[in-house]
Image (cartoon, helix red, strand yellow):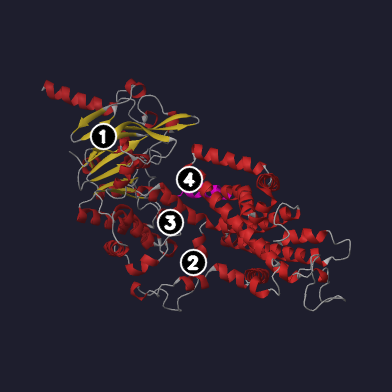
Amino acid sequence: MTDSSHTSSTNTPSAGTSSASAAALPALPGRWERFRDSYLLYSFKRDVIAQLSLLVFIALVAIAAFAPWLSPMNPYDLAQIDILSSELPPFWIDGSDPAYLLGTDAQGRDMLSTILYGARVSLIIGFGAVALQAVIGVSFGLMAGYLGGRVDAFLMRLADIQLSFSTLMVAIIVGALVKAIFGSATFSTYAVPLLVVIIGLAEWPQYARTVRASVLAERSKEYVDAARVMGLRSKRIMFRHVLPNTLSPIFVISTVQIANAIISEAALSFLGLGMPETHPSLGSLIKAGFDYIQSGSWWITLIPGAVLVILVLSINLLGDWLRDVMNPRLYKG
Amino acid sequence: MALLEVNHLDVHFALRKGDVHALRDINFTLERGERLGIVGESGAGKSVAAFALLNLIAKPGFIAGGEVNFEGKTLNTMSERRLRKVRGNRISMIFQDPMMTLNPVLSIGEQMIECLKAHRRITSKRARAIALDKLHQVQIPSPETRLAQYPHELSGGMRQRVIIAIALLLDPDIIIADEPTTALDVTIQAEIMALLLNLCEQHNVGLILITHDLGVVSQVTQRMLVMYAGRVIEQGPTREIINDPQHPYTQGLINALPQMATPGEQLNQIPGSMPSLDNLPSGCAFHPRCGFVERADGTTRRACIDEVPGFVTSGNCQAACHMVAEMVDDRRLKEESL
């Protein structure tokens, strides 16, 4: 998994002078030139789906990040909510109010604003949970793979045990416990960090296993022996020498894990164990609107649902592309 | 006191199929600035010996007995912390395959500076200057550019130069070179070997050269060990062993060199192959391949099959062989009867 080879220089020296003497070596490419000439960019330029997904993903992240400035109203501010304008349809249906572009929900909140804020919450939880997973999983995987022996056996059994509990089960138990002990109000206040911790803890074995597998492959390479012969510490060899060589698989599973974390959060919220309706994520929006499908107000649940699907799909498609690019077997032959 | 003293070094590997005795009773010394060759076939234990010197035998292997003394301090009982101060700093090592020894994701400069900073308290700027100086010494073209380059941007020969530069980085007392030229193009091999020899002489660095190339050993080293199946079977001054090998295995190795063959004839070879370490023959490990188990008069030398031979001294060399022992005895008897 030498991802350095992606940055291998593909620029051909000007014709004729390629075998010039050492003194006439071309100036060394900087980071930007290396990136510009990389296989990563080359393949991205030729993959329309990857380009579209990245565009959609960046757009969604941007509007989520700038939600407070972009959205017409603040859905968290009770003063701005008008119960009289509840369940208004989106603009293309008769009876809509031009002030509410995507209609309103049952409490009279502007759908567009709640979706923007909701996507923000979903993305924060998704990225936060994956960051936590990565920190735990990568360190455990590194230790298990590099140190081996009992450490390896202990950490991997721990991972097996963790994997035998499904994310939902852990979340339901922890969520229920917190609600029972500290009350719903406390749960609502700390819902975001709590969900990050729950989803992060539930899925770290994915990272640990992937990292361990590639560390095992890297550990037997001579550069690790060479680093030990140089008298470097184990910790330094693990993090500075071995870890960078396992980055490609880490990148690839990160995309999958972000999508998974966002879905997990949505599922939990849908079950009423995630974000409260006063502070909705995409999942809790879908749940809130679900009760009104029968009464004909389908947009309350369907529009956030569509946003969720588009978000997850764009991440997954990006992950697919990344996996193809970073798999050395597919392009090196 | 010698700079490096290896006494009765024993290395075992605790494998699932049983205990494998990879090194048995290795003894040698290395003086400051001396060059020692360790020769043997693949699997004879040469590389294990190199790693054992730095106490870097990986599990399931372990040093079961004996000691490695460096400047009077025993390396194999030293704490990991103090050992790290020896590794890379006082004793450094060059590996066989330059494609594999450098970390692919770190630039040459980063790897060199890291090594310096692990052992000395110096600024990055100073470390860079030292790294650059060493790259100059190994005569790599445009060293400034190399510092920022990654290993995959260099050719095999250049990488091995970089590795030699890294080995010299902290002005070590000993360099252990484990087949430093095997993975290189034949045209580069001589160049790299000459460079290594030159630098060792210049800086008065001791060299332990591990190789299966008798030609290189005879040109570069002053003393040599011949290893067979985890044991040293002959040791002494390189010139004497090459000119007058005592042990039948060493004789076989030298006879197998292409320049020893008659033109147009097949190359000479030692019949059979080296036994695996977990299934050694009884007595002398070489006896199934040896042409001297039978004496000239047709009688079998039982000792070869039953007894592990000890070292007998003949001139400045020592060989572990019953046949040589008999010859030496005969000679002594003759001299006494005269």
Q: CA distance from mark 4 to mark 2?
A: 28 Å
Precedes in sequence: disc 4 or disc 2:
2
Q: Amino acid at mark 3?
A: Asn
Marks 4 and 1, how far apart at CA: 46 Å
Q: Where is residue A79, by image quadrant?
A: bottom right
Of the 4 image quadrants, the one containing the N terminus of chain B is top left
Please state if A85 lies on the left or on the right of A155 as rendered. right
Q: Amino acid at mark 4?
A: Tyr
Q: Chain of mark 3?
A: B
Q: State yes or no: discs 4 and 3 in contact (Cβ < 8 Å).
A: no
Do the numbered discs 1 and 2 sit on residues whose CB atoms are within 8 Å? no
Are circles 4 and 1 on residues that touch, CB within 8 Å? Answer: no
Q: Position of residue B77 (x, y in %)?
A: 31, 35
Q: Is residue B318 left or right of residue B179?
A: left
Comparing labels 1 and 2, the label whose residue is closer to the camera: 2
Query: Which is nearer the N-term, disc 3 or disc 1?
Result: 3
Element under disc 3: loop
Residue B246's disc number: 1
The reply to whether label 4 and label 3 mark residues of one chain is no
Q: Which residue is mark 2?
A: A8
Numbered circles on residues, count: 4
Q: Amino acid at mark 2?
A: Ser
Dot 1: few (<14), some (14–19), or many (≥20) neighbours within 10 Å?
many
SS at mark 4 in the image: helix
In magenta, the rendered stretch is A210-221
